[in-house]
């Protein structure tokens, strides 16, 4: 039974779903990295929010880990390249808390416009300072969105309802989408110069880090009010403090900080500064949504192989997974076969699908071919990290679908390109389930690729099979299955034998010495 650790506070629905889906679950929150390292080895899955930092060191100790699920959106607390390199799938729940977070941004905008927290504190202190708190109206003001994705567009929708003018800076925002959203697409400098309120809704990446730098803040309109419900590293906090102190910045509301938990900050106590402790996603509705989603997604992956919302792997629905499973087994065997047989550096690999296979999602099939191909040289390769490793090695990977009907109702062909040219193998599924090799380097064969095997290429001549059988028999090697194919009578023949134990170097040398043998190799599947 797969075992999952919930390491951050999560709605109880998550644990309930895991149990209902046959996944064992432990809820252990608030662990230090050292404590987490000590226990993470027991788990197949890890469900987190933003507190747990899934670092390279943690992943090194996660010997059984297959999947990390983020109950929320931002995954800057997960070292995705390290997870990919280890073959761990990373998933998030991209929509579950977006409305809630957008509402928090709007709430903070109102709070800034009317200085609600300071007015509240003063009133409750018995001061009744009616003349101290003069606010601004939102109607007709310009709201500048930095980042117009899911949350940014909900914020835009709400702001338009408040009769604000919305302008947006997002390099990936198309003019059509801007039109549909009812916002004006602008450059960052234009946004800085025109916005009365600025709200940030981008992930934290190398491009967005410090996007509101001291220099950018200096370009803003005097009196601008800034809201950040995205990530702390997007704003230079010291420059923000200086801007608030000088009065150039009229107000700032931060839900997120560069260092969290933010127990101290030069910003605390500054006039017109409001803060909340990363509460953007903290509503009952959003937490139920993300808890259900993350548990369903992790359970799907661990129980049936379904992949949803993965950041480092193509999606595969829980319905598709059982259909694709035998294809992935076939693909992995074909990848392994070409990996074991290829001589010299492989520069390209093509995956072709014919018949029923052509209608399938090819990404997982390609991942399985690459995993089989590269596992020949490394034990730690799987479907998740194989495409990344292939890219790292500069392997040119191609996927081709053919409409044509071939000899088989379904066929997957894998062709590798080496300095010596192209070589291909092809396989089908018998009864839609059992992987079978049907073609090897242009020769028709029919073989089950399983366990230790012996591969022999020889000149087709009478008596050869007998001599080979005797050689193996004398060495005490039992033959399980025997598959033969040849280009033409008397031409090149290929033999694939499954053997009960791997053929050792001595025996291989004897086989190679038999008359007519061109190549002989031991294979393992
Ligand atoms: N405070 C909180 O509790 C929460 C914070 N968040 C944060 O909000 C962020 C945004 O979430 P979503 O809108 O769902 O993500 P999203 O992926 O739908 O949208 C992000 C947008 O940022 C844009 N973007 C990327 N690089 C950019 C750049 N250099 N300049 C301008 N725009 C850029 C993208 O094109 C995209 O449209 C998340 O990454 C997360 O960090 C999300 C949920 C809760
Ligand atoms: O979903 C996100 O990106 C968030 O920042 C929410 O964080 P949390 O789950 O509340 O720790």
Image: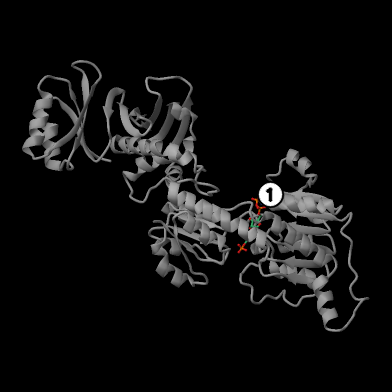
User: Is residue 99 depicted above or below 497 in this figure?
Assistant: below
Task: Give the percent coordinates (x, y) of residue 415.
Answer: 38, 30
Please give the residue where the numbered disc 1 appears in the rendered image.
149
Seen at 31% across and 30% down, the residue is 437
Left or right: where 114 falls relative to 25? right
Residue plotted at (85% across, 63% down): 222
Residue 202 percent coordinates (x, y)? 67, 54
The quarter of the image that holds ligand 1 is bottom right
Q: Quadrant of the N terminus?
A: bottom left
Q: Can you say whether 47 is above or below 415 in the image?
A: below
Instruction: Look at the image and tell me whether residue 286 can be seen.
Output: yes
Q: Position of residue 118 (x, y in %)?
A: 81, 75
Quarter of the C terminus within the rendering: top left
Query: CB of residue at label 1: within 8 Å of ligand 1?
Result: yes
Q: Is residue 101 left or right of residue 472?
A: right
Question: Under tag 1, what secondary structure?
Answer: loop
Q: Is residue 96 above or below residue 522?
A: below
- Relative placement, left or right, of 508 versus 308 is left
59 is higher (above) or lower (below) than 494: below
Task: Give whichever of 175, 47 is nearer the camera.
Answer: 47
Whether residue 74 appears in this view of the structure is no
* Quarter of the image where one finds residue 144: bottom right
- Residue furthest left in the image: 474
Locate residue 449, reporting x and y percent: 28, 35
């Amino acid at each position: 039974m797969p075992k999952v650790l919930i390491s951050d506070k999560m709605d109880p629905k998550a644990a309930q779903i895991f149990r209902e889906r046959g996944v064992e679950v432990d809820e252990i929150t608030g662990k230090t990295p050292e404590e987490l390292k000590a226990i993470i080895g027991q788990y197949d899955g890890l469900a987190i929010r933003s507190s747990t930092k899934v670092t390279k060191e943690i992943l090194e100790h996660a010997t059984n880990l297959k999947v990390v699920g983020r109950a929320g959106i931002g995954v800057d607390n997960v070292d995705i390249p390290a997870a990919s390199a280890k073959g761990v799938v990373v998933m998030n729940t991209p929509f579950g808390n977006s409305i809630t977070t957008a509402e928090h941004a709007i709430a903070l905008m109102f709070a800034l416009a009317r200085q609600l927290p300071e007015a509240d504190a003063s009133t409750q202190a018995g001061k009744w300072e009616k003349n101290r708190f003069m606010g601004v109206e939102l109607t007709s003001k310009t709201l500048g969105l930095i980042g117009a994705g899911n949350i940014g567009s909900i914020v835009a929708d709400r702001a338009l309802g408040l009769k604000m003018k919305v302008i947006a800076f997002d390099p990936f925002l198309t003019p059509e989408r801007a039109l549909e959203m009812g916002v004006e697409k602008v450059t960052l400098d234009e946004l800085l110069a025109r916005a009365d309120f600025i709200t940030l809704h981008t992930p934290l990446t190398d491009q967005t880090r410090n996007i509101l730098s001291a220099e950018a803040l200096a370009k803003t309109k005097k009196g601008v009010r800034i809201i950040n419900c995205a990530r702390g590293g997007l704003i230079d906090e010291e420059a923000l403090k200086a801007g608030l102190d000088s009065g150039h910045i009229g107000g700032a509301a931060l839900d997120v900080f560069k260092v969290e938990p933010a127990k101290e900050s030069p910003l605390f106590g500054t006039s017109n500064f409001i803060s909340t402790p990363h509460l953007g996603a903290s509503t009952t509705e959003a937490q139920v949504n993300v808890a259900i989603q993350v548990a369903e997604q992790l359970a799907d992956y661990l129980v049936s192989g379904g992949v949803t919302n993965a950041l480092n792997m193509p999606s595969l629905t829980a319905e598709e997974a059982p259909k694709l499973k035998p294809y992935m087994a076939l693909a992995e065997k074909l990848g392994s076969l070409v990996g074991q047989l290829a001589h010299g550096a492989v520069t390209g690999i093509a995956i072709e699908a014919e018949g029923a296979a052509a209608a399938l999602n090819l990404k997982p099939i390609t991942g399985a071919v690459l995993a089989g191909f590269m596992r020949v040289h490394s034990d730690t390769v799987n479907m998740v990290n194989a495409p990344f490793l292939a890219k790292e090695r500069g392997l040119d990977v191609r996927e081709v679908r053919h409409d044509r009907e071939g000899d088989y109702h379904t066929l997957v062909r894998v062709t590798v390109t080496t300095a010596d040219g192209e070589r291909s193998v092809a396989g089908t599924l018998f009864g839609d389930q059992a992987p079978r090799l049907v073609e090897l380097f242009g020769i028709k064969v029919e073989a089950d690729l399983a366990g230790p095997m012996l591969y022999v290429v020889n000149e087709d001549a009478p008596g050869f099979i007998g001599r080979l059988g005797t050689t193996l028999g004398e060495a005490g090697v039992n033959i399980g299955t025997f598959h033969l194919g040849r280009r033409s009578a008397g031409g090149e023949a290929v033999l694939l034998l499954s053997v009960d134990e791997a053929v050792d170097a001595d025996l291989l040398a004897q086989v190679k010495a038999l008359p007519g043998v061109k190549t002989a190799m031991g294979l393992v599947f």
